[in-house]
Image (spheres, grey):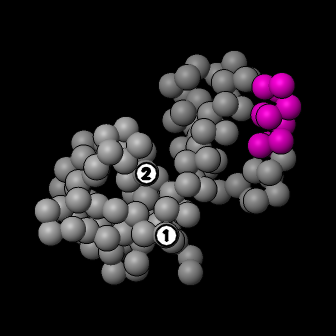
Amino acid sequence: MTIHESAEDYLEAILILRERRGTVRSIDIVNELGYSKPSVSIAMKKLRENGYISMAADGLITLNDSGLEIASRIYHRHRTLTELFALLGVSPQNAAADACKVEHDLSEETFARIHDFVRRQKG
């Protein structure tokens, strides 16, 4: 199944928030991404319908296995690309912002080479 970039962004945000806060609610995603409450609500409904997340009665959001797999892949790409750009001398803020723009579009082959290069640079 093809997943859209925006869905990947939401799943990645849920993973990051879970790591940072322990629990995630829709309002946390609103605050993290700066999207409107209705937009986040619609996105959460779609992610739930597609089996990527579960939402408890109290509003807690949990990544299902398929959602966690996608979120982990995108977040790994984000961190690695941020490291690459930082190695090139890009400011931390721009490195992270540019990583967000690129993380979804690279082929697996290109990302694998970038990953290997960054690891070699770190020693």
Numbered label attached to residue 56: none
Q: Is residue 121 in the magenta section?
A: yes
Vertical side of 76 occupied by 57: above or below: below
At 85% from the left and 31% from the top, the residue drawn is 120
Q: Which x, y percent locates residue 115?
A: 77, 43
Q: Which x, y percent locates residue 24?
A: 28, 51
Q: Which x, y percent locates residue 85?
A: 68, 29
Near-viewer residue (99 or 11): 11
Give the residues drawn in magenta, as a range: 114-123
Q: Amino acid at mark 2?
A: Leu
Q: Which x, y percent locates residue 32?
A: 31, 42
Residue extending farthest front: 22
Quarter of the figure that contains the C terminus: top right
At 65% from the left and 57% from the top, the residue drawn is 105
Q: Which residue is mark 1?
A: 65
Near-viewer residue (57 or 87): 57
Find the distance from the CA under tag 1 to the CA under tag 2: 12 Å
Secondary structure mainly formed by the magenta segment: helix
Q: Which residue is mark 2?
A: 15
| Quarter-of-image position of residue 109 | bottom right
**Crowd around label 2: few <14 · some 14–19 · many ≥20 (10 Å):** many
- Tag nearer the camera, 1 or 2: 1
Q: Amino acid at mark 1?
A: Asp
